[in-house]
């Protein structure tokens, strides 16, 4: 069953879709809504179960469902022209699923702090552990201690308490059902390298230099696979680069958007 996707919107013009990380929600894109919303129609959906989007029962967890939810959400808003599709981490995995399932609906790609490879068995098993733990606890409160040191770079952890607090709040209040669904969907995702090779659209790949979850080497591998891609490395940022270094992130995306045909 399709999720009734909640979308935070800002601005008018060419549609730019921003897909959030796990286990966050669309509010993580506040600095981008402000910066890009001056010239573009920015659409920030919540994945099923997160933020304002309910978690429909019944479907096996799959990022293909998340991609099809997005297609339905765009249809519902009359967005039928190809969009600029940006995703950070899990958002990037969903962007790659969308590219595979709805290739004609993507005009350009921004892949931030993500990777094209599938999970090795140990990573998939760890996701199942987390899924079972949060569901058993009925809460994601214990996830903050485990995830924050990985999600945020050392510079942010040491010098940006407001960003740390925002991320902690999003992680610790994430609904357990959504956390479990997303972990199982990510564990089941295929390798997307061939989809990137086939992508006939311009791409920007962004990565925080302190990213410990999806490393610079993962970003370089995506750039090598994509036919038309450029890499931007953000210093002093970790995995959540759009929140940790928003000015540099926004500048890179705005420059990329301005150079697109019809940009
Ligand atoms: C994310 O930030 O979305 C997650 O770290 C992705 C993942 O767990 O692979």
Image (cartoon, grey):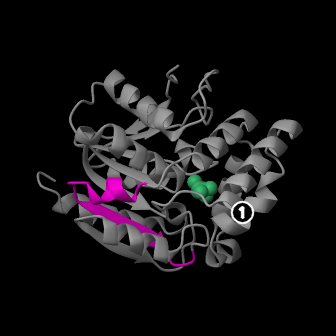
Q: Is residue 53 above or below residue 46?
A: above
Between 200 and 257, the one lying in front of the other is 200
Between 146 and 164, the one lying in front of the other is 146
Q: Residue at x 24, y 58 (%)?
A: 257
**How many discs appear?**
1
Q: Residue at x 82, y 47 (%)?
A: 141
Q: Residue 139 location in percent, x, y?
A: 82, 40
Q: Is residue 241 above or below residue 171?
A: below
Q: Residue 77 location in percent, x, y?
A: 33, 25
Determine the quadrant in which ligand 1 lies: bottom right
Q: Quadrant of residue 236?
A: bottom right
Q: Residue at x 78, y 53 (%)?
A: 143
Q: Is residue 128 above or below residue 224?
A: above
Q: Is residue 83 left or right of residue 24?
A: left
Q: Quadrant of residue 168?
A: bottom right
Q: Is residue 208 visible?
A: no
Q: Residue 104 location in percent, x, y?
A: 22, 39
Is residue 85 in the magenta section?
Answer: no
Instruction: Please identify the residue farthest to the left as the structure is shown.
Output: 262
Q: Is residue 201 visible?
A: yes
Between 253 and 129, the one lying in front of the other is 129
Q: Quadrant of residue 116?
A: bottom left
Q: Is residue 68 left or right of residue 13?
A: right
Is residue 203 in the magenta section?
Answer: yes
Q: Which residues are magenta?
A: 192-210
Q: Residue 122 location in percent, x, y?
A: 71, 61
Q: Residue at x 62, y 26 (%)?
A: 55
Q: Residues within 10 Å of mark 1 (few under 14, many from 20)?
A: some
**Helix, strand or loop status at disc 1:** helix
Q: Which residue is mark 1?
A: 148
Q: Is residue 88 left or right of residue 99?
A: right
Q: Is residue 158 left or right of residue 33?
A: right
């Amino acid at each position: 069953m399709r999720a009734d996707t909640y979308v935070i919107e800002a601005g008018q013009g060419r549609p730019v879709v921003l897909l959030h990380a796990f286990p966050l929600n669309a509010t993580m894109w506040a600095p981008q809504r402000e910066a890009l919303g001056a010239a573009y129609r920015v659409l920030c959906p919540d994945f099923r179960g997160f933020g304002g989007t309910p978690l429909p029962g019944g479907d096996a967890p799959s990022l293909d469902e998340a991609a099809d939810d997005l297609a339905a959400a765009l249809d519902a808003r009359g967005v039928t022209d190809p969009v600029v599709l940006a995703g950070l981490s899990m958002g990037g995995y969903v962007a790659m699923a969308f590219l595979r399932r709805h290739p004609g609906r993507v005009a350009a790609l921004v892949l931030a702090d993500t990777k094209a490879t599938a999970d090795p068995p140990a990573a998939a098993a760890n996701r199942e552990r987390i899924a079972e733990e949060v569901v058993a606890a009925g809460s994601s409160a214990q996830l903050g201690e485990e995830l924050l040191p990985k999600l945020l770079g050392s510079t942010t952890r040491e010098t940006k308490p407001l960003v740390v607090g925002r991320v902690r709040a999003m992680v610790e209040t994430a609904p357990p059902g959504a956390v479990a669904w997303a972990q199982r969907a990510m564990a089941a995702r295929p390798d997307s390298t061939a989809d990137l090779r086939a992508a006939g659209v311009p791409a920007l790949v962004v990565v925080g230099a302190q990213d410990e979850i999806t490393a610079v080497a993962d970003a370089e591998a995506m750039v090598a696979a994509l036919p038309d891609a450029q890499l931007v490395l953000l210093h002093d940022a970790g995995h959540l680069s759009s929140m940790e270094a928003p000015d540099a992130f926004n500048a890179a995306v705005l420059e990329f958007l301005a150079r697109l045909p019809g940009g």
